[in-house]
Image (tube, grey):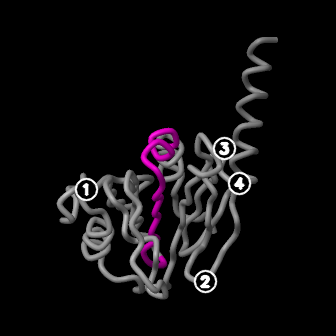
Amino acid sequence: MEKSCVRLAMLLAVATLALNAESVAGLRWSTPPGWTNQGSRPMRAATYTVPGATLAENGECAVYYFGAGGGGPVAANIERWRSQFLDKNGKPHDARVSKRQVHGLSVTLIDTSGTYTGMGGPMAKQPASNPGYRLLGAIVEGPGGNVFIKFAAPEKTVARNQQKFDQLIDSFARENK
């Protein structure tokens, strides 16, 4: 009986992940539990609301896709993201950058924190300044082009959701055709 319950729980978990699967550029991934997909937007394959301790601390994780060959080189994007976080002297903050393989896909990761200036966007009248923010980012090199994942939020929200971000990245795989 106990083995049947465990097996049923595992099947339900797999079914839940399958229902929450997303895809773009020949890749698929699964929405982490507790994150809400707000759907696609221009240049975004998905936009997730990430719960914080309070509503004011909620974060956003966006999955960007600019088309095959779009979005620029991996290194340039990592540097741009790093430069959006300033230290107490107003200089770009140090970042941890690493590479790894996920289901045979090359993934470049970045983890940085500080005063986030990247929230304003190109249409903002003044640059944003959000102290105490952290970024977890990833660039997945897929068969149809690079997919960019950017999770920027208050440091507490990112720390609280780091495991779910890792689950999101670990779920990336080539689509089965």
Vertical placement of residue 42 versus 35, above or below: below
Distance, label 3 to label 2, CA atoms, is: 24 Å
Q: Residue at x 52, y 58 (%)?
A: 173
Q: Earlier in the sequence, mark 4 or mark 3?
A: 4
Please check the rendered image and state whether residue 164 is part of the magenta-colored stretch, yes or no.
Answer: no
Q: Position of residue 80 (x, y in %)?
A: 29, 73
Distance, label 4 to label 3, CA atoms, is: 9 Å
Distance, label 2 to label 1, CA atoms, is: 27 Å
Q: Which residue is mark 2?
A: 42
Q: Residue at x 28, y 55 (%)?
A: 99
Q: Position of residue 61 (x, y in %)?
A: 54, 60
Distance, label 4 to label 1, CA atoms, is: 28 Å
- Decide which of 158, 26 is in the foreground and name it: 158
Q: Which mark is residue 97?
A: 1
Q: Which residue is mark 4?
A: 20
Q: Which residue is mark 3?
A: 33
- Decide which of 166, 34 is in the foreground and name it: 34
Amino acid type, residue under disc 1 in the picture: Val
Q: Position of residue 161 (x, y in %)?
A: 52, 43
| Badge 2 vs badge 1, beta-carbon distance below 8 Å | no
Vertical placement of residue 25 versus 115, above or below: below
Q: Which quadrant of the rendered structure holds the C terminus? A: bottom right
Q: Earlier in the sequence, mark 2 or mark 1?
A: 2
Distance, label 2 to label 4, CA atoms, is: 21 Å
Helix, strand or loop under label 1: strand
